[in-house]
């Protein structure tokens, strides 16, 4: 009796496909016969293994700001700080205001769903619903990311009047791209190519913002922090405590902010300023009341800030002009820093962007021609990627999926409108995208498996890696 490979059980075939079949051969193999097609259709493991071997981009499930109910308000594993935290004797800070002792706890009981209780999205055209756990399609997209010119470049917005430092945030559920323009925060509906919403403020540009969920937007307009309740369109301006003395001679523009909530009722708002200060404020959405909890002065201007997944701690990146510690860890409940990361930074090499890869691992990049990967559990840098062309980084996008398959890091450079795709596991540069002919920094990025959005001085562009061109329609919006 002759036995062929078709007589093997499914689990053996799956094991063979995972170990010995290349990415290209998987697509060919499913066309060989009905048996192979059925095995590859019902078993995702071969596609998942193949996807992990190539440079790929997934959704960042940790950002907790998408409008999709699949990943909104999800509780992932809490950050674990097991290393001894300490501050060097030469690190300078000053507590300017502290009301934390009056608060029993800034964080109420966590009402977020655990990550193993994900609800599938019922919206058929939702980007996440179309691609999540669809490893075959993600593998096809990753081949386009890694191929030459296998995408289409669409210009969405042109800035005619003056150069802009536009900041982007993409809503994958509703196909909406948020961006800033002068004193205005706008929302571009990509399905209709219409600006369907905008918030305009006087006197100063929008320097940073966070569309946190369907309920709240935090926005910094110069030195004023504003909170927008999306359900009512009410806007609240947050003033400093009357007992807080301003820092003389320092501009206090807010340069960074982040938002955290674990019950969609009380929100923690973190902001860092040009005058070297970092602040924590609470906002109760039902009572429509905000309160400054504490404010601390650090050694340089605060360029970026990110809460941990559980909100118990946060990181800030500073300009690094006066010390060798531009990356600082705080306890949210207290007004003093608890740890600085000594990663051989040179003086002046500030940290401009921080993104989480998992609950315990994050990437920091900025003015040092490097990106560095840290583990908050050990408190040390375990990987440094040096840019061989000497580029500084203005923007960073790090997709994160709960299956640890995604390995692509997307970096916006400080000149020539270039974007770099780095393979995190192989620790090497995979691809360079020239997104525009402008000699401009890439100020901001928004990334999905299908699309890459980037803002330059004079335009906002989208690189489309899918075969669907209906999402990007003319004409181009001009301001």
Image (cartoon, rainbow, N blue to C red):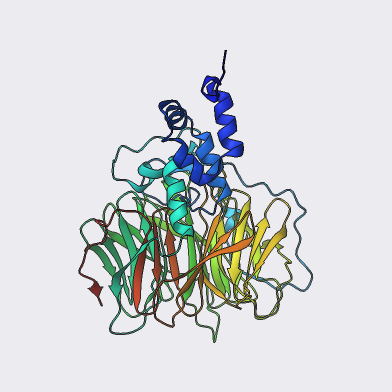
Percent coordinates x, y for residue 56 in the rendering: 51, 53
Residue at the far front: name it: 1
**Image quadrant containing the C terminus:** bottom left
Q: Position of residue 108 (x, y in %)?
A: 51, 43
Residue at position x 58%, y 25% from top? Answer: 12
Q: Is residue 81 shown left or right of residue 123?
A: right
Q: Quadrant of residue 333?
A: bottom right
Q: How many marks?
A: 0
Which residue is painted at 36% across and 43% down in the image? 130
Residue 349 can be seen in this image? yes
User: In this picture, is 207 found above or below 5?
Assistant: below
Q: Is residue 46 left or right of residue 340?
A: left
Question: Would you place residue 109 above or below residue 357 in this image?
Answer: above
Q: Residue at x 34, y 50 (%)?
A: 214
Q: Can residue 218 be seen in this snapshot?
A: no
Q: Quadrant of the N terminus?
A: top right
Q: Is residue 10 left or right of residue 140?
A: right
- Relative horizontal placement of residue 51, taking residue 340 as reference (left or right): left
Q: Give me the residue at 26% from left, 65% from top.
A: 198
Location of residue 213 in the rendering, given as x and y in whole percent from the top left corner: 38, 51
Q: Given the current orientation, which residue lies at the most extreme bottom position?
A: 249
Which residue is nearer to you in this view: 369 or 215? 369
In front: 357, or 98?
Answer: 357
Above-or-below relation of 9 to 436:
above
| Residue nearest the viewer, comparing 456 with 208 | 456
Residue 365 point in image, percent of width and height: 59, 68
């Amino acid at each position: 009796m002759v036995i062929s490979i078709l007589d093997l059980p499914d689990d053996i075939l799956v094991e063979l496909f995972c170990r010995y079949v290349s990415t290209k051969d998987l697509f060919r193999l499913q066309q060989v016969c009905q048996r192979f097609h059925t095995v590859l259709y019902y078993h995702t493991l071969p596609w998942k293994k193949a996807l992990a071997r190539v440079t790929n981009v997934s959704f960042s499930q940790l950002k907790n700001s998408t409008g999709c109910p699949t990943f909104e308000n999800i509780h992932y594993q809490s950050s674990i700080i097991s290393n001894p935290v300490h501050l060097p004797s030469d690190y300078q800070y000053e507590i300017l205001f502290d009301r934390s002792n009056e608060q029993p706890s800034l964080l109420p009981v966590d009402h977020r769903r655990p990550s193993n209780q994900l609800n599938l999205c019922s919206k058929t055209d939702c980007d996440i619903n179309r691609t999540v756990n669809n490893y075959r399609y993600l593998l096809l997209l990753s081949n386009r990311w890694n191929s030459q010119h296998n995408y289409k470049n669409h210009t969405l917005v042109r800035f005619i009047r003056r150069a802009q430092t536009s900041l982007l945030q993409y809503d994958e559920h509703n196909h909406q791209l948020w961006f800033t323009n002068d004193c205005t925060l706008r929302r571009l509906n990509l399905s209709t190519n219409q600006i369907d919403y905008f918030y305009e403020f006087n006197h100063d540009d929008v320097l940073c913002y966070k569309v946190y969920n369907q309920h709240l937007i935090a926005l910094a307009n110069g030195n004023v922090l504003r909170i927008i309740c999306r359900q009512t369109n009410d806007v609240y301006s947050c003033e400093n405590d009357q007992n807080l003395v301003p820092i003389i001679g320092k501009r206090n523009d807010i340069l960074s902010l982040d938002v955290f909530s674990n019950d969609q009722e009380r929100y923690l708002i973190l902001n860092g300023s040009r005058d070297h200060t970092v602040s924590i404020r609470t906002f109760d959405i039902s009572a429509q009341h905000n309160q400054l909890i504490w404010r601390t002065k650090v050694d340089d201007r605060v360029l970026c800030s990110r809460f941990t997944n559980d909100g118990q701690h946060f990181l800030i990146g500073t300009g690094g002009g006066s010390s060798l510690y531009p990356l600082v860890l705080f306890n949210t409940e207290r007004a003093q820093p608890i740890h600085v990361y000594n990663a051989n930074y040179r003086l002046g090499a500030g940290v401009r962007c921080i993104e989480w890869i998992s609950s315990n691992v994050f990437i920091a990049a900025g003015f040092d021609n490097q990106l560095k990967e840290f583990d908050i559990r050990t408190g040390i840098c375990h990987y440094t990627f040096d840019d061989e062309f000497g580029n500084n980084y203005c923007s960073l996008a790090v997709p994160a999926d709960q299956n640890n398959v995604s390995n692509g890091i997307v970096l916006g450079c400080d000149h020539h409108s270039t974007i770099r795709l780095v393979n995190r596991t192989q620790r090497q540069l995979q691809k360079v995208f020239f997104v525009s002919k402008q000699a401009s920094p890439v100020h901001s990025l928004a990334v999905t498996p299908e699309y890459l959005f980037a803002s330059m001085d004079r335009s906002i562009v989208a690189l489309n890696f899918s075969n669907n061109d209906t999402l990007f329609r003319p004409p181009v919006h001009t301001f």
